[in-house]
Image (cartoon, grey):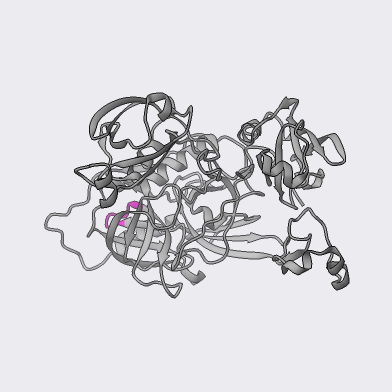
Amino acid sequence: MKHPFRNRRALTLAGVLTLAAGGLTWSVTALAESVVHPKVAVKVDDQSIARENFSESGSYAPVVKRVSPSVVKVEVTERAKDVPAPDLPPFLSDPALRQFFGIPFDGNSGRGGRMLRQPPQEGLGSGVIVSTDGYILTNNHVVHDADVIKVTLGDQRELTAKVVGTDPQSDLAVIKVDAKDLPAITFADSARVEVGDHVLAIGNPFGIGQTVTGGMVSAVGRATLGLDYEDFIQTDAAINPGNSGGALVDVKGRLVGINTAILSRSGGFQGIGFAIPSDLARSVMQQLVETGKVVRGYLGVAIQDINPELADAFKLKEHSGALVAEVVPGAPAAKAGLKTGDVVTEFGGEKVVDSRRLKLAVADIRPGKEVTAKVLRDGKPVELKITVGEAPRKNPLTGSDNGQGSSSDQGTLNGVGVADLDQRMRQEFDIPTKIQGVIITEVDPNSASAKAGLQPGDVIQEINHQPVRTAEEAVKMTEDPASKKTLLRIWNRRGIRFVVVDETQPSS
């Protein structure tokens, strides 16, 4: 089970799904700040648009003139750096052969130590001004790993932006420019958006300049990209590379979504685009600005949708609800009495249609709040009181990184992956049974930890004088630290030693 300290999750889109950004996939490191900002004052209009007897005036020009200054161009640059080279053929794993072919060996990289110099990378996207004092919403994949971010306003001013926070789980990010009296957009209530509503997509496709396209809402509640939290608005308004982070607005010029991705066989527009609903975007934005991270509710269950076969096996009359496949011991769901095989039909007074809706509903609950859940157990209704917990940074069921919080280096030991020290690990790295701790599985060669000499195979026994036994403990010990200097007690085959990892200095 791998537990990376730093959020390093890249979006992998299956098949023909394409992110609507021109350039790279990023993860914020260099520009992120740990400063806690005040709550963003945004404009909200939650009234529904008029759908009865709606007639077009023949032009959206007045709406576009009012809204377009709120949409900006976002240009990002990642400086040149060394990256691990691709894996070598297996026969070159022999040190003698490597020496014969002149290939150096250094165990730090995990790929024979071969490093390639990656030239400077550039990317292009869009953003939406959400406050008059310079807060801008965009996509995480637009600013991921950016060293320099330039924002071009509608009046052609070019400003440098800093990252306030990112949320890879929803693919949202907040950046900020130092400016006043900016044209902030007005938020709509995206829960009121309906299929058939007219919408406009505004952004900077292909870097050719601000462009407006029109269409309608094709569907709502889509889950297509494999993100942890998805509730996309689907539209046939043309969205292309460079539109990522731009605005999807209704006929009143209110923000209903942040344009994020397209479904395409060619990489360009084919009539299917996806936008993150403005309600979700606003919630994530406020948390990132106020605390630097996103806190979500947590039950501690693995859930799945109910298909006809499962409905028949569990003797269910309906196919709606969320089937509990596993319960984490000691998690809120377990404490409340939820069991494997239960079907959650209602949560917090709202009907549970499928597993995705339950996941979104739980995430939206403030940790510590008690919520009533109705379940079917062996075909009989059961009511439970569940005190919702806070979602951990690592998924206890899969060991994967949840991408919690921003990539703004809120923790320490960034770039280090750790795992529980089980029997397989002990055999692989020849670790005596008396040695306790967590094993380092990977180290980013450009991180402060690598500079301090940490290597895969090292065992962390203590963090800041505190013994550590599990990877989960290690992760928690490095969250929200009092200092960016971490004292470690390390065991490896050369003996036991103390190491200080200093992350007060920028990584090379």
Q: On the rendered structure, is 412 left or right of 40?
A: right
| Residue 344 percent location from the top left of the image | 30, 36
Q: Nearer the viewer, residue 258 or 212?
A: 258
Bounds of the magenta span?
250-256
In the displayed structure, 5 sits above or below 237; it is above
Residue most extreme to the bottom: 266
**In x, y percent, where is residue 43?**
37, 43
| Residue sitting at x 77%, y 39% | 431
Q: Is residue 259 above or below residue 364?
A: below
Question: Considering the image in quadrants, where does the N terminus appear?
Answer: top right
Q: Quadrant of residue 201?
A: bottom left
254 within the magenta span: yes
Q: Nearer the viewer, residue 395 or 235?
A: 395
Nearest the viewer among 46 and 433 is 433
Q: Nearer the viewer, residue 325 or 368?
A: 325
Identify the residue at horizontal 53%, vertical 34% (top origin). 291
Q: Position of residue 84 (x, y in %)?
A: 72, 61
